[in-house]
Image (cartoon, rainbow, N blue to C red):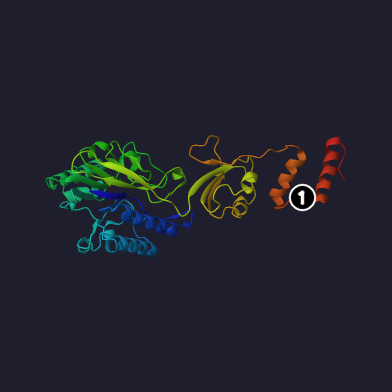
Amino acid sequence: MRFLHTSDWHLGKTLCNANLLDDQAHALDQVAAMVKETRAEALVVAGDLYDRAVPPKEAVALLDDALDRLVRGLGVPVLIIAGNHDSPERLGFASGFLETQGLHVAGPLEAGASPVLIGNAAFHLLPYADPATARHAFQDDAIRTHQDALAAQLARARANHPAGRRFVAVAHAFVAGGEGSDSELGLAVGGTGEVDATLFKACDYAALGHLHRPQEAGYAQVRYAGSLLKYSASEAGHVKALTLVELPDHGPVRTEPLPLSPRRDLRRLRGRFEDLMRGPHGEAGDYLFLELLDEGPVLDAMARLRQIYPNILGIQPAPATPALPQEVVPSVDRELDPAALFETFFRDSAGRDMDEAERALFHEVAGRTLSGEAAE
């Protein structure tokens, strides 16, 4: 069978006060188009549909529209699990009724949950659950860690797995060794929220959510689809995509990334203030995190740069050694003589270039000072 794997939509998220709802709607249009073009038999969403437990009404309306187009419009089953950002109870509302319509939602953890059967596969929906929640759901006091909780879920799934079907696990977890980003909430303190990739080794495919970069997680058949959009500066180098999964009756799974084209890209740009002001460098409307190479402070840098780059999200001094992918704006040649330095200072302070009278006055005063004469 053929299905699409996605995760971490984070609908309703804002980034440095920028509302991303239009960008998310643009991406979801592409998701619906990919489902139609690939003739996918299902769409799997591995958690974090919303950015917070109580999402804004606009985010709820956007999800409602997207699911209506997919399930009713295209007739494609959609399989969803709750992630650590979601409210399991809110997400799972009316799930029993919706299942008959082709929308399968695993909100709260249920010990006796049955798999979703589509084509040659049985999809085991394993919603995010912390150890305390799993301990209560399974009535097992031995569950103390996220590893224990997920192992218990997978064991129950194995016990309920029908013969003759490929085993597909859908989970939301931090697999040890995975590459994270700044926009992901830690699942526990000190790495105790991590789980071992060997938990998924026996799966025919594991559709994972939580980490925002598309990547394998220990094995070729264990994958993160990544987030819908770039949600932090640390994700500037990511290529966001859906994963097309082809699962034959026998043999290894085949996967293919299907890149998404953002309404606005998110980039890191690094350079001197003067060089950035000569821009735009790249698409001016992109979301930008700027790093300034100037040694001293630049007056009113944000307001002035926004005249050229309207969607700046943040400005900070650049570190000595860049740690993340970024574009460097080339510097122009400068004559570092006193006149050039003063003209730069005047421009930064006054917001305009010096006129001829001011330039002549500077040369007169500078000439007297350099020659040892007292200025009047």
Q: Position of residue 281 (x, y in %)?
A: 58, 47
Q: The residue tagged with tag 1: helix, strand or loop? A: loop
Residue 349 visible in rendering: yes
Residue 128 visible in rendering: no
- Closer to us: 247 or 241: 247
Query: Horizontally, is 104 left or right of 57 in the view?
Result: left
Above or below residue 228? Residue 72 is below
- Closer to us: 143 or 269: 269
Above or below residue 144? Residue 84 is below
Q: Position of residue 46 (x, y in %)?
A: 29, 50
Q: Quadrant of residue 208?
A: top left
Count of labels in the image: 1
Q: Position of residue 331 (x, y in %)?
A: 63, 39
| Residue topped by disc 1 | 354
Q: Position of residue 54 (x, y in %)?
A: 35, 60
Q: Quadrant of residue 166?
A: top left
Residue occupying image coordinates x 86% and y 35%? 371
Query: Horizontally, is 209 left or right of 25 in the view?
Result: left
Residue occupying image coordinates x 26% and y 61%? 75
Image quarter where the C terminus lies is top right
Q: Amino acid at mark 1?
A: Met
Q: Mark 1 Cα within 10 Å, few/some/many (few <14, many 20+)? A: some
Tell which residue pokes out farthest to the left in this image: 163
